[in-house]
Amino acid sequence: MARIADEFGEPIVRALRDAPEALRPLRGVIDGMQAKQLRNHDGVGDVDVYDGPGGAGPVQGPQLPNPDGDGPVEFRVPDDATPDEVAQFHDYVNRSNQYLADGSLSDSGRVSTAGEVSREARREARLERIRAAEAGTPYTGVAAHVPDSTWVGRGKPPGWGDYTSRVNSSLAGQVNRYPVGHNPTHFIVRE
């Protein structure tokens, strides 16, 4: 759990320390973050969710420039999203960051999901829905790949999410803003 805070928080704190004077007030936000643990619905493990000072809500990291072309991957929540859908976006991002920290993502960055990866992804989602139904815990929404196959490089993800079709489609569609080969440094939710 602390691994995510160390891996993603420390580089941001260092960057803010060296940042222009105008960005330094953000350091106070980071210094005031409080970590809460949430259990993934699939029991994979605990992840960190950062609340602002006093538990005021999620704190989104600044987008820092990266001359190598890699960097954060941002997911924007639609304006008309329900509270449950907002929570699903946060679940996806928190768990994707955990899997990134665990080394579960593709070493070559974003990959094309055409061909075999797409076929494998559909097959694995079908098998996951069957597995969940047989276990007595059927999906109420889509069996969503967490993270999307484009970040993993294969059809079987490290985790699954039970998301609305709208959230799953939005998450999948937003990856097209990043070129094949883009290596995420972390995932961010923008509300």
Image: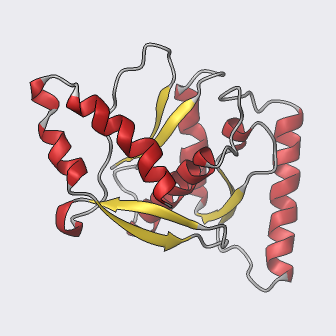
Residue 111, by quadrant, is top right
113 sits left or right of 66 in the view: right
- The reply to whether residue 31 is in sight is yes
Residue 64 x/y as whole percent: 34, 27
Horizontal and vertical percent position of residue 31: 22, 51
Q: Which of these two is toward me, 20 or 84? A: 20
* Residue 68 x %, y %: 50, 14
Q: Is residue 27 above or below residue 181?
A: below
Q: Nearer the viewer, residue 82 or 25?
A: 25
User: What residue lies at 48% left-to-right and 42% top-to-bottom?
Assistant: 187
Frontmost residue, 53 versus 110: 53
Q: Is residue 62 visible?
A: no
Does residue 134 sit above or below 55 in this rendering? Answer: below
In the picture as drawn, the residue positioned furthest to the bottom comes out as: 136
Residue 176 quadrant: top right
Q: Is 79 on the left or on the right of 140, as rendered?
A: left
Residue 182 relative to residue 11: left or right: right
